[in-house]
Image (cartoon, rainbow, N blue to C red):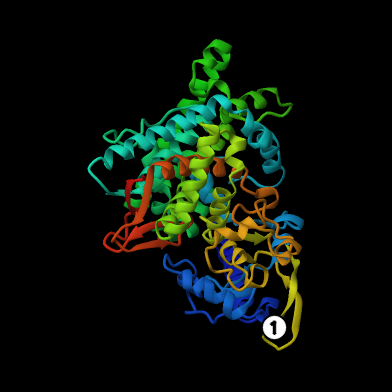
Amino acid sequence: MFAKAFLTLAALFAARLVWWTLQRFVFKNPLDNVPGPEPDSRLMGNFKRLFSVDGWDWHRDLFARYGRVVRLTGMLGERQLYVADPKALHHIVVKDQDIYEEHPHFISANSILFGKGLLTTLGDHHKKQRRLMNPVFSTAHMRNMIPIFQEVMLIVVQLRSTLEKQTEQGPAEINMIHWMGRTALELVGRAGLGYSFDTLMPNDPAHPYAVSIKELVPLQFRVFTLRVYVLPYVYNIGPAWLRRAIVNIIPSPTLHELRNKVDLIWRTSNEIFHQKMDALRAGDDAVKQQVGQGKDIISLLIRANLKAEDPCPEDEILGQMSTLIFAAVDTTSSALARIMYMLATNQDVQDRLRDEIRAAKAQYGTLSYDELEAMPYLDAVCRETLRMFPPIPTLMRKTIKDVVMPFSQPITGVDGREMSDVFVPAHTPILISALNANRNPDLWGEDAAEWKPERWLKPLPQKVVDAHIPGVYSHLMTFLGGGRACIGFKFSQLEMKVVLVELLDAFVISPSSKKVHWRMSNIVSAYVEEEPLKTQLPVVLSRAS
């Protein structure tokens, strides 16, 4: 009996393998007519260059040579589409978003890391979570976070004081990534979780939670193959204890280190959650004694969930906490680091921005949310940096059924004929290039690849407006769009502006003598040639006169 069952399974597996091989290497695929580079190898396709940490030039060359929609080859001949066309992007993230789902590898791997948060749920489940969270991230709520906003300003004043001590004897080289990460965690810790992680004092070590959050992306990248091709299958095996046992026996020290970081993040989130619940049960006086006085994002989310007709279970709230911290800390600190670098290498922009900051402080004193938002050059510097250097340059989707993808302008197929759309078979991986969509010279002009904050001080080119780019922020794909747009993008902007206002008032930022490179990973990070495995951005700080 067992032998027959085994033979049946073996025959089914063999038949599936034959069918898969025919689809990949024999049958014609409609995507074959889309222009694109030849695979670098039969086994790996374009995989290595697509995900290279130094792949910036290759990604830009794809757009320049092949256009806004490019056919790529994945592992074992898998066809993929690389997309920066505005109309195609609108269908991917808005009109047909239920067809272009998050890639299963992304969902399963992040479920293991963060639990059931916004990053890892799909369909109606995702919409339910988002409905619960949308009011908490609204502009109206940002304005109402006065007690927390005052605490946020004190955090950044403490950062300023710490850096002033390090520059007492004159200009000093500072690793800004280190301080931006710690500051971002403390900002989102207080405003997001109502919890203080860090004193930001020079001799105090970073909180273990902060260290774990910052090391997640580098660790994931070091086990990229396991993350993409092993963990998704582990995630679908049996109960949690069995999955953990499988991870424990995989002979990868890096994977085990990643497991330990995830455990620490989960334990900390669980501790904070139960502190919040205990305070809510104890009444308003207990809530007011907490950091944020109960007006932090998670406290409001817990209250809204308790009142909901169909509340989310506890593990989903915990998932939202881990997701919120990870997304806010890594992407915001990456964006802030890039802004610091651009200001260091463009002193004229830095001087002009400092003048605007000092004029606003002279007029208003401590700046409110609305006064921060009313600073045009500060806003222009942030927008232009997020346009040119999105912290997440590429995002992945996968079609769950056949679909036709239209283009904003026809492309010339491999057969020489014009194509105004392409039939995309089910299960096709789609790569959204925020990097190339944001730098499209057909829309932004010949200087699209240049960092020019002043472009935001006048009306944008009409072509940009008419393109109807589906991004939730400033005609850009930096924060994505549609139902999976970054829900906290307004809060991220607030963090960046608060930090920049305080630091630029106090310091002049200059480039270090060390050569800085930018790692093109899940989230962009900086490193120097001498220590390529360490995330760091050395700049020279001196007191501003």
Name the residue carrying label 1: 413
Assign the N terminus to one quadrant of the image: bottom right
Q: Residues within 10 Å of mark 1 (few under 14, many from 20)?
A: some
User: Where on the picture, by quarter, is residue 37?
Assistant: bottom right
Check the image and name the residue furthest to the left: 169
Q: Position of residue 429 (x, y in %)?
A: 61, 65
Task: Report the number of numbered marks.
Answer: 1
Q: Nearer the viewer, residue 474 or 422?
A: 474
Could one spot residue 258 in this view of the protein?
no
Location of residue 412 in the rendering, given as x and y in whole percent from the top left corner: 70, 83
Residue 280: percent from left, percent from top: 57, 16
Instruction: Tell me if residue 229 can be seen.
Output: yes
- Viewer-side residue, 529 vs 385: 385
Q: In the figure, 422 relative to 275: above or below?
A: below
Secondary structure found at label 1: loop
Question: Is 216 positioned to the left or the right of 33 in the image?
Answer: left
The three-letter amino acid code for the residue at tag 1 is Gly
In the rendered image, the vertical position of residue 514 relative to residue 215, given as above or below: below
Position above or below: 390 against 411:
above
426 displayed left or right of 385: right
Q: Residue at x 67, y 43 (%)?
A: 126
Relative depth, front residue between 249 and 65: 65
- Residue drawn at (75%, 70%), measured in percent from left and top? 408
Q: Is residue 17 left or right of residue 419?
A: left
